Amino acid sequence: MREPARWHTTGFHFWSKPARCGELLTRVHDSDDIDDLSGAPSAAPAQEKPMGFFQHLEELRWTLIKCAITYLVFAAAIGFFLKEFNDLLLWPLTSVKADFPQLTLDLGTTTIMEGFTVVLQLCFLGALAPAAPFCFFFVAQFVAPALTKKELRMVVPTCLCAFALFLMGAAFSFFLLVPSTLRVAAELNQLFGFITRWTPGSYYSLLSWLTIGVGAAFEFPLIIVLLVYLRILQVATLRKYRRHAIVAIFVIAAVVTPTPDPFTQTMFAGPLYVLFELAILAGAWVERRRLAET
């Protein structure tokens, strides 16, 4: 009785006692899996071992390094195009100068090192907005293995909404709130007969505070929706305490806006209240969808 063929595999070399080389090559060519040639079942892929504590720290370290490198690259790019970037940031002041041609609103330094301070301020604060999406992406890569599929589907929309809300707040502040604040300050100087001596440091500090502060304040509706999604907050509670929310919004407007005039505060509080109402509608949609799934 003829002995059945026995197959042995090592790397890319195959041996069989009774089979010829041509027959072997034909059988290997016709097979999709080498294990099928021996009749043995294919082995299941080995599962990855869970990462240890120090491996997580190493991943976190590289995530922070990538975020820092991205931030420094954008800061260096702004430093390379510093003149053009500075001309862009002077737009609110230029628009106010057109309304008050009799006032001298040119910026002037009062200390020797103020110019260097302004350069650092422009580079490092200006790199926040362009570097933020990349940093969000790197952090999402780090957190993704610990999330479920349902949670992963929420990461990208949440990051996009957060970035869009921040840009909306920053644009609102840059094109409306900052010129309004400068206009009120110029009117007060004209009323009291003060000599206007604004420095680059004070101007860019005001611009940075309003732009970043208002951009961060525009994130609060997203926080409300996330709290509703996590079942920490209910839409009924938001509707019940709507009047308290209006008072809190005006308090936030009073803290963020540097001028005490009610016009500027109302200009800032109005969009915040609209976002609050939109957050209630989005939270109600989240609750309805949760009930439909159950």
Image (tube, rainbow, N blue to C red):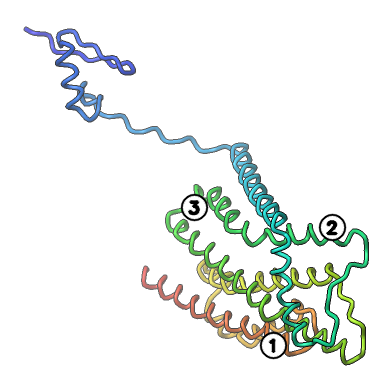
Q: Please name the residue shown 69% across and 64% down the image.
A: 84
Q: Which residue is mark 3?
A: 147
Which residue type carries mark 3?
Answer: Leu
- Which of the marked residues, 2 or 3, is nearer the chain's N terminus? 2
Q: Secondary structure at mark 3?
A: loop
Q: Secondary structure at mark 1?
A: helix
The total of numbered circles placed on residues is 3
Disc 1 crowd, CA 10 A, few/some/many (<14, 14-19, 20+): some
Q: Secondary structure at mark 2?
A: helix
Depicted 78 relative to depicted 93: above or below? above
Q: Name the residue tied to disc 2.
A: 116
Which amino acid type is shown beneath numbered disc 1?
Thr
- When asked about the image quadrant of residue 2, the answer is top left
Left or right: where does residue 192 sit relative to residue 122?
A: right
| Residue at the (84%, 72%) spot, across then down | 107
Residue 28, image x, y percentages: 20, 22
Judging by the rendered image, the residue that carries numbered circle 1 is 266
Residue 213 x %, y % = 71, 71
Identify which residue is drawn at 68% across, 58% down: 127
Q: Which percent across, then down, holds residue 226?
A: 54, 68
Q: Spatial distance from mark 1 to mark 2, Cα to Cα? A: 36 Å
* Residue 21, above or below 29: above
- Foreground of the two, 31 or 167: 167
Q: Nearer the viewer, residue 48 or 26?
A: 26
Around disc 3, counting alpha carbons within 10 Å, would you say few (fewer than 14), some (14 to 19), or many (20 or more)?
few
Q: Is residue 210 left or right of residue 107?
A: left
Q: CA distance from mark 1 to mark 3?
A: 41 Å
Say if 26 sits above or below 244 in the image: above
For label 2, count other residues whose C-alpha is less than 10 Å away and answer few (under 14), some (14-19) or many (20+). Answer: few
